[in-house]
Image (cartoon, rainbow, N blue to C red):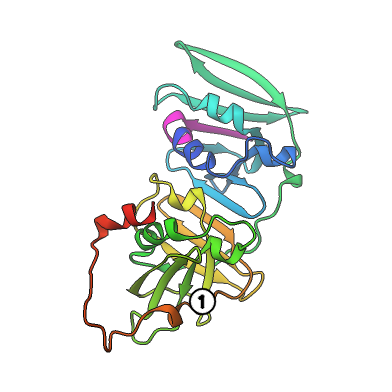
């Protein structure tokens, strides 16, 4: 198998994988990126077992089907250079040959071949539907989530679909002292809602604003899928029941005064 990629796309992929791959992963294979080709389509994937990000290349070429694993440190190194320059992976025998330009000269090196069969399986595809406003709302409320590791369920953003009407979904985050919510959304989530962990990938500014969203399973063991541009992102939902956040929202009845904050105030309030 032979894969030919452009450095421009490889750089974009590496920027996203940087949010997934740990500096010192628990398993060596989790420090790698899996490149795959099937039917001419080329993709790259990184995972830490709880979350997986897959990037689909738009300007790559493949000769044959298959997969190859490369250390993420090497991927970052290969991404440096002109956007139009080519990076080539070739498999054969017991090693993987990598060819890339350096100072106008093509440099070929060999890396140890890691069996792609050892790569953790991401599970079945999760069907998604358009989720207008989801990423913007998620990023708006995420700073209010708890950083306390002993309160895991509060470390996520609760997508509550129990409201009425066509736009009855609300995103909620709290640390036990402050609570914020963003309502009037129409999102494809189960009636019981889902708690999505606050992750570096979903907060990454490199993602396009509009996304599609899907949830598989329900309750403990649910998984969330977000598709955005060339990216497909899956993450394990936070297990546990989210607190009844509505009971702490004061009723408007009998209130003499009301203060309204704009979007620009969300940052200072979260600090």
- Relative depth, front residue between 170 and 150: 150
Is residue 222 highlighted in magenta?
Answer: no
**Identity of the residue drawn at 71% across and 46% down:** 119
**Identity of the residue drawn at 54% across and 76% down:** 243
- Relative depth, front residue between 38 and 122: 122
Residue 66 point in image, percent of width and height: 65, 43
Residue 29 appears left or right of 102: right
Asked if 163 appears above or below 59 in the picture, the reply is below
Q: Which residues are magenta?
A: 1-10
**Count of picture labels:** 1
Residue 154 point in image, percent of width and height: 55, 65
Q: Residue furthest front?
A: 256
In the structure shown, which secondary structural element does the residue marked by tag 1 occupy? loop
Residue 263 appears left or right of 162: left
**Identity of the residue drawn at 39% across and 44% down:** 206
Residue 6 appears left or right of 62: left
Tag 1 residue:
193
Binning the other alpha carbons within 10 Å of mark 1 as few (below 14), some (14 to 19) or many (20 upward) gives many
Residue 80 in sight from this viewpoint: yes
**Identity of the residue drawn at 65% across and 37% down:** 32
Residue 225 point in image, percent of width and height: 52, 62
Is residue 3 highlighted in magenta?
Answer: yes
**The image quarter in which residue 152 lies:** bottom right
Asked if 88 appears above or below 191 in the picture, the reply is above
**The image quarter in which residue 34 lies:** top right
Work out which quarter of the rendered image holds the N terminus and state it. top right
- Relative depth, front residue between 3 and 234: 234
- Relative depth, front residue between 236 and 79: 236
Residue 127 in sight from this viewpoint: no
């Amino acid at each position: 198998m032979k894969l030919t990629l452009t450095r421009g796309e490889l750089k974009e992929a590496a920027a996203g994988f940087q949010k997934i791959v740990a500096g010192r992963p628990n398993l060596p294979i989790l420090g790698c990126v899996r490149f795959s080709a099937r039917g001419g389509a080329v993709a790259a994937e990184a995972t830490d077992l709880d979350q997986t990000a897959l990037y689909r290349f738009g300007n790559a070429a493949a000769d044959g089907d298959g997969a190859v694993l490369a250390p993420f440190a090497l991927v970052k190194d290969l991404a440096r250079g002109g956007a139009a320059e080519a990076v080539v992976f070739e498999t054969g025998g017991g090693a993987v040959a990598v060819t890339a330009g350096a100072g106008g000269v093509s440099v070929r090196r060999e890396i140890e071949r890691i069996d792609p069969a050892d790569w953790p399986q991401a599970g079945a595809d999760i069907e998604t539907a358009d989720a207008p406003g989801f990423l913007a709302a998620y990023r708006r409320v995420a700073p209010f989530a708890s950083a306390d590791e002993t309160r895991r369920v509060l470390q996520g953003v609760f997508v509550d679909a129990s409201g009425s009407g066509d736009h009855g979904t609300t995103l909620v985050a709290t640390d036990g002292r402050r609570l914020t919510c963003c309502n009037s959304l129409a999102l494809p989530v189960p009636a019981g809602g889902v708690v999505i962990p606050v992750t570096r990938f979903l907060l990454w500014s490199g993602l396009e604003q509009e996304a599609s969203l899907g949830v598989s399973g329900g309750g403990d063991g649910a998984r969330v899928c977000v598709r955005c541009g060339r990216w497909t992102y899956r993450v394990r939902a936070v297990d546990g029941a989210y607190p009844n956040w509505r009971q702490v929202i004061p009723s408007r009845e009998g209130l003499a005064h009301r203060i309204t904050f704009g979007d620009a105030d969300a940052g200072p309030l979260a600090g």
